[in-house]
Image: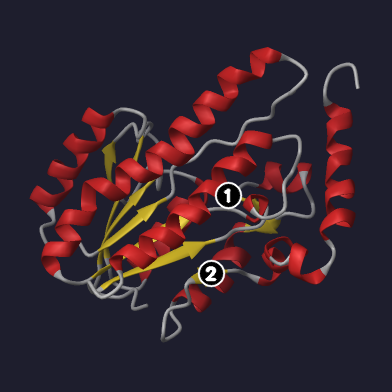
Amino acid sequence: MKISGRTVFIVGGTHGIGRGLARRFVDAGSTVVVGGRDIGEVEGLEAVRVDVTDPESVTAVRDEVLARHPDLDVVVTMAGVMLTEDLRDPGHIAQAETTIAVNVLGTIRAIDAFTPHLLRRGAGDIITVSSGIGFMPFPLMPTYGASKAAVHSYTVSLRAQLAGTGITVTELIPPAVATTERQLELNPAALPLDDFLDEAVGLLTQEPTPEEIVVERAQPLRWAERDGTYAELLERRSQSLKNLPGR
């Protein structure tokens, strides 16, 4: 995938991996717009406010972005939340509903908003973002894992339905990524953001573009079932449940 000379909208690009990816596109010579609910801390990037749980907000931002950038040819769906849940407490349904609303329905809304434009162009790229947790659950965040598994499955179907249209559909599958020094202190096993982006962008710019962008640190999660390590990894990752109250 070419990342220079493109016009890119990154939904959820106001922080974390999304903002880092936005800067990589800009550094390569592309025009980038980032969208999110909080755009107050975005510097050096064109930013628009959008709430992916609100259909009217998504429609409005689509119209705003396309009015400014009618040559838009890359859409990245990065918006997401990661919440812990205690499944012994029925009150967890609030976290579950929020997770599905943002991670799954928000992804679908963003794609639906821009697909007609890309189809009219007859060319373009859609990048979805799932997670290694979508393939190898982290039981402390059950609905997050389920939502990312859903994004993966949806992406596969989207790719099949858009075959032959000129639109390429690529899935980014991150491992744990530390976007701040504090996050790296809390999880030393996380991959520093710049290291992740170096590897991910290297894979993304291959020709032909891989269907899945899986950095080395994410490989054990993506292929745990194939490699026969699923049960062992799940048991290890289930140790995090000891952090729940009363466990």
Viewer can see residue 85: yes
The residue at which mark 1 appears reads as 149
Look at 40% across and 37% down and name the residue there: 105
- Comparing 224 with 24, the one in front is 224
- SS at mark 2 in the image: strand
Q: Earlier in the sequence, mark 1 or mark 2?
A: 1
Q: What colouring method underlies this structural image?
A: secondary structure
For marks 1 and 2, give the CA distance: 15 Å
Q: Please tell me whether residue 212 is drawn above or below residue 157 in the rendered image.
A: below
Q: Is residue 3 left or right of residue 186?
A: left
Q: Position of residue 147 (x, y in %)?
A: 55, 41
Residue type, label 2: Ile
Instruction: Give x and y (percent) for residue 97.
Output: 52, 24
| Count of marks placed on residues | 2
- Looking at the picture, tell me which residue is in the foreground, 183 or 64: 64
Which amino acid, by three-letter code, is at mark 1? Answer: Ala
Q: Quadrant of residue 214?
A: bottom right
Give the quadrant of the C terminus: top right
Q: Position of residue 103 (x, y in %)?
A: 48, 39
The percent coordinates of residue 218 (x first, y second) are: 68, 64
